[in-house]
Image (spheres, helix red, strand yellow):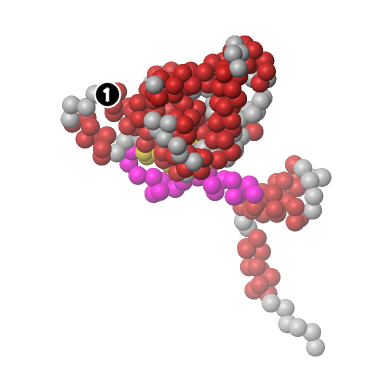
Amino acid sequence: MGRRPDYRRKKYGPFQARTLKNVLAHRIESEFPRIGGPRIRQLCAEMILEVVGNHIRPAEHLTHGQVLWMAISVDDPPSYHKRIIDTDLVPVVLTLSDRADIESRLHPIPPEKRRLAKALRLCQQAYEQGAVLSNCDLAELLTMSESYIGSVLAAHERDTGTVVPRRATVHDVGTGLTHKRIICYKRYAEGKSSDQIARETYHSIDAVDHYLGQYDRVRHCKLQGMTPEETAHTLACGLSLVKEYLAIDAELETNHA
């Protein structure tokens, strides 16, 4: 005798298939019929949902003074002709205003110090969430010019001997020599190891060794009596880079004099 049909499951079971994932898979099948079979379409739908889920924050996850910002992944450095649409982006929650900011307004704290404190906090928060902010990001968030915020952070790095975890330093974007100077100073003035320097400057050990190696080669050429132009030609690098390391070397020599 045959098994009795389960009419309830037959009628209401299809409700379980009414999911956003299946809607996406069906749309993929309609728009891209050659993309593959049901398993591939379901996998594509899952990846889309994963991306969307990672880039959405419910309102209750944000508190007063916070904002959701799309920042560049710390693990995706720039390369030649690489566009932002080809770059990994990370949604980060940043605190634009907190209790400390309000307190600083209630006390006679100069505006430039308040702006610096905000910029440092935003850079640190983004880095802790796996991303880096550029000077342009900070300029937009804090409604100030890119050149101003860049000069303020560079001055802070020079004065404190620390590196701010932003895109200019972590990804070596820009013409500033601050992080190179700090890395070389920590090795040749403070005698620190590459792994310790890497931790303190938000760089990889390979990046630290790369900068130190460049400095050593430029210094060697200088000691051989070569001009900056000859050094750049010999090392197959830019003249501006050579001048950066020569400036670092001059500063180190002055400190040891």
**Residue 92's spot in the image, x, y percent?**
46, 41
Residue 166 against residue 4 in the figure, above or below: above
Query: Is 98 part of what is drawn in magenta?
Result: no
In the picture, residue 74 is in which quadrant? top right
Residue 26 against residue 160 in the figure, above or below: below
Q: Image point 70% across, 46% down: which residue?
A: 27
In the picture, residue 154 is in which quadrant? top left
Q: Few, some or many C-alpha atoms within 10 Å of disc 1 (few <14, some 14-19, many ≥20)?
A: few
**Residue 62's spot in the image, x, y percent?**
39, 45
Residue span colored magenta: 47-65
Q: Image point 41% across, 46% down: which residue?
A: 59
What is the three-letter code of the residue carrying label 1?
Answer: Pro
Residue 111 against residue 43 in the figure, above or below: above
In the picture, residue 253 is in which quadrant? top left
**Is residue 89 in sight in this rendering?**
no
Viewed as shown, does residue 35 lie left or right of 85? Answer: right
- Quadrant, the N terminus: bottom right
* Viewer-nearest residue: 162 or 142: 162
Viewed as shown, does residue 222 lie left or right of 158? Answer: right
Q: Image point 65% across, 68% down: which residue?
A: 13
Return the residue at label 1. Answer: 111
**Residue 80's spot in the image, x, y percent?**
66, 25
Query: Is 63 part of what is drawn in magenta?
Result: yes
* Viewer-nearest residue: 249 or 181: 249
